[in-house]
Every structure is written in C-alpha cells, then in structure tokens.
Image (tube, rainbow, N blue to C red):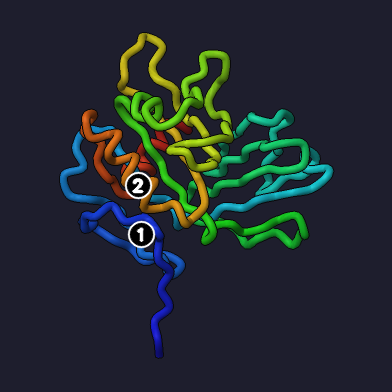
Amino acid sequence: MAEIRRESPVDFGVRSLETEVRSDWPVALAYDAEGDGPWVVDLSHKTRWDLQDGQVGELTPAGQSVPATPGMSVLADGILINRMNRTQTSIYHLGSDAPDLPDHPGFTDVTEATIFLALFGPHALHIAEKLSNLDLGDPNKEAPFLLQGPFCHVPCQIVTLEKDAEDGTNGAGGFVLTCSRGYAQSMVHAILDAGAEFGLRPAGEQRFAQWLAALSS
C-alpha cells in the first residue's frame, strides 16, 4: 500500500535534526546549530482557513470572536484570527491540532495553497525592513496586528505578533506571513539572504512553540 505524504513547498537546504509525521506532513521539530536567533520556521503544515461572509463580524470561528476592525488580530488558545476587510477573515491554527473545517459555505481551507513562515528573535523586524516597506513595528498599533501588501514584492498577509522592546533593544520582535505556494523558494532565498548579516538560521517547530508560549503567558 502506497504511503500518503504531504510535502511543504519550503526547503531551507539543511537537514532537520528531529522530524515528526503529523497528518501525513513531515514536520521539522529542530535543526542542528539553531543558534541564538533570529530564526525562520516553516509552519506550512499548520491549518489555515479563509472565511468570507457578509456578516463575518458576527461569527465565532473555532469559538473565537472576529475582530471588529480590518487590520486587527486576536490570538487566543493558539488560534490567530485576522480581520482582512468588511467581509473576510483569515484564521491560523498555531497550535498542534486544528478542528475539522466548519460546515459553513464561507470557510475555505487554504493550507495547501499557501506557505506559512514565522520569523522572530533579535533583529527580526530589521530583516523585514530590508524586504518590505510595510511597517511591521508600527508604534501606533498594538500586537498582534495584520498587514496586507508586498513582502519581497509578493502579495502577503503578515501578522506582527511581537514588536521590538520599547527600550530599543532587539531581544524581541517577530511575525508570521503567508503567501501563494508558488513563491515558496524565492521567498525563502530572499529572507535567508537578507538575514545573513544578523545570523538568521532555520529553526524547528519546537522553537516556534516556545516563542508562542511566551507570547501567550
């Protein structure tokens, strides 16, 4: 009997130190010599939904309320919900498990149509400044918040989960981004190249989980 296997379009060019198969996805849990950050993590196996409805603000996907204003995001219980516009919301399941797709015509599972990356740690937002004119550290916004626009000249959804520390140090800061699957390798190449001067390295899901837990505490 043939083994079913789902493949991420993201390839960092290095072999993972520890891998786990989850829902037929091989998930890199850790890499050798991840260093002290910043880090880039492939989260393409994480379930992502798009929700479109004329009354989207009244719905509660995965039991969570949709933010009232476009550009606002809410992170609770490992679920990140981002209000895109009047009728559309994106939902990222950042925890290890996700519920079944709701029986509602407005939901679409976009997991396999897009890539999903996290970039966080020291100088993460400095790296972003080299790749986009979007202000991921906007002082007038409180994280998490959604930005939509070009990153590496590619249309993306980007959610700042943590801004740099208020004292100007770079021990904090990070974001997740998603874009069309076809741009995966070009996006990874550009990010790694831009982050080389800051020591950017690939990391596994365990590193992301530690960061997410710290944000949620």
Q: Is residue 1 placed above or below 85 in the rendered structure?
A: below
Tally the marks: 2
Is the residue 186 above or below the residue 167 in the image? below
Q: Nearer the viewer, mark 2 or mark 1?
A: 2
Q: Residue furthest top?
A: 167
**Marks 2/1: CA–CA distance:** 17 Å
205 displayed left or right of 84: left
Point out the residue furthest to the bottom here: 1
The numbered mark, 2 or 1, whose residue comes first in the sequence reads 1
Residue marked by disc 1: 27
Q: Quadrant of the C terminus?
A: top left
Which residue is at a point 25% across and 33% down the rendered structure image? 37
For this view, does 81 lie left or right of residue 16? Answer: right
Residue at label 2? 188
Image disc number at residue 10: none
Identify which amino acid the numbered label 1 is placed on: Val
| Residue 10 vertical placement versus 168 (above, below) | below
- Three-letter code, disc 2: Val
Outermost residue, left side: 33
Q: Residue at x 54, y 49 (%)?
A: 93
The image shows residue 98 at horizontal and vertical percentages of 55, 56
Q: Quadrant of the N terminus?
A: bottom left
| Residue 2 position within the rendered picture, expressed as x and y whole percent measured from the top left | 40, 86
Q: Quick one: SS at disc 2?
A: helix
The quadrant in which residue 65 appears is top right
* Residue 217 visible in the shown view: no
Q: Secondary structure at mark 1?
A: strand
